[in-house]
Image (tube, rainbow, N blue to C red):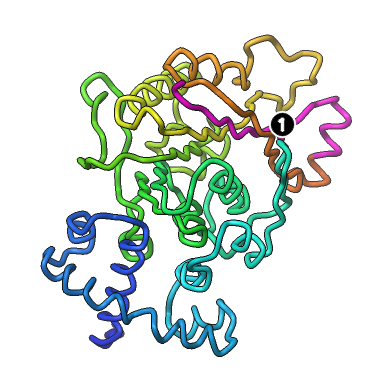
Amino acid sequence: MELIPCCMLQQKRSGEIFRMHRLGIPQDRIAKRLGPAREVIRDHLAEMAVLPNPPNADLKKGFTVSQVAEKHGWPDPMVWSLALEGRNDHDRFKELGWGLRTWDQWEWNDCDKRFGDDWPGRIPAQMIAHILRYFSKPDDLILDPMAGGGVTPDTCLAMGRRCWAFDMKDRPDTRPEIEPFTWDVSSAQSRLWPVSAKEKPDLILFDPPYFDKKAADYDEKSISGLSKKAYLEFLEAFFVLLKRNVKKTTRFAFINADWRDFQNTPAIEEKYKGGILIDDYLDILKKTGWYHTHIIQAPMSTQRFSPVVVSAMQKKNILGVTSRYVIILNQQ
């Protein structure tokens, strides 16, 4: 087994602490996540003022973000957070090469590979950035309850937002900023919240599994394995839990897609209530005290339908699903 030099481990640990601190994760949770005592974390943070100096020096010399990231062993989003420090949202979008959609249809053919890991159900960082730009302010605290591949915390770094991210899959070596937590809204655990903190999020960004889409790729304990009834019941209980644990002014961005069991079923034979559509989500949200202000269409790419699949669908008059929505809500 190859041994990693102590100085490299120290550098890696400093980078992890810096990233988590940059995302607004408190010292006690950083210590719990990484292992060192809180006093050690505090000592590391005292060194954080000079840690960015070498990457910043290289950026000033004209090196690209990817070059600086590779040289110093930092993730691209961390270097972007330095390169864009002090910039407004408009300038951040421009530097990142993201055109701003000023209407309620956001569509991208592919994800920005600089942000987030290769992950089932990966969503475009561009979509997260649009939500942040329109519905949050710089340095706001964002909550991502099901962070998956880390697109949201990565995008928050580039956009100058703090982020508390959680996921049932624990990856301490590669994603220490995504804290492990499994949401259990059964009767015994219905009030369980992942952290005890006075500060509460300004925006919740919730992108759960879209019912059983990609179910085979998710953990067997994922909500994608639930029945339709249990899935909707989970969402209802979860929306109540969110409301109990956030501020009255907290906004909620709920991302989900229409689900219809269209495979091998011609469109004319589909039945009412045979799927889960946007009205089902809106009914549950309103019932639990969340009221929508915007419904933004953010369709999934059609590239996932191969020519062979499209040909078969055409022959049988099967109507597939690309509909996906970003529903923005508040508590009135």
Disc 1 secondary structure class: loop
Report which quarter residue 185 is drawn in: top left
The relative height of residue 121 versus residue 326 in the rendered view (above or below) is below
Looking at the image, how many numbered discs can be counted on the residues?
1
Residue placed at 58% from the left, 56% from the top? Answer: 89
Q: Quadrant of residue 275?
A: top right
Residue 61 picture location, percent across and down? 55, 90
Q: Nearer the viewer, residue 311 or 4?
A: 4
What residue appears at the point 22 percent right and 63 percent down from the top-left corner?
34
Which residue is identified by label 1? Answer: 321
At a point 72% along the width and 47% down the height, the residue shown is: 101
**Part of the protein shown in magenta:** 310-332
Placement of the N terminus among the 4 image quadrants: bottom left
Residue at 79%, 27% in the rendered image? 319
Q: Residues within 10 Å of mark 1 (few under 14, many from 20)?
A: some
Residue 227 in magenta stretch: no
**Left or right, 154 with reference to 295:** left
Q: Residue furthest right?
A: 315
**For this view, does 271 lie left or right of residue 49?**
right
Question: Residue 93: x and y, percent?
Answer: 63, 59
Name the spot of residue 325 as percent of width and height, x first: 63, 32
Task: Specify whether 262 is left or right of 244.
Answer: right
Q: Amino acid at mark 1?
A: Val
Residue 319 falls inside the magenta stretch: yes
Q: Is residue 205 above or below residue 7?
A: above
In the displayed structure, would residue 250 be above or below residue 151? above
In this view, 136 is above or below 276: below
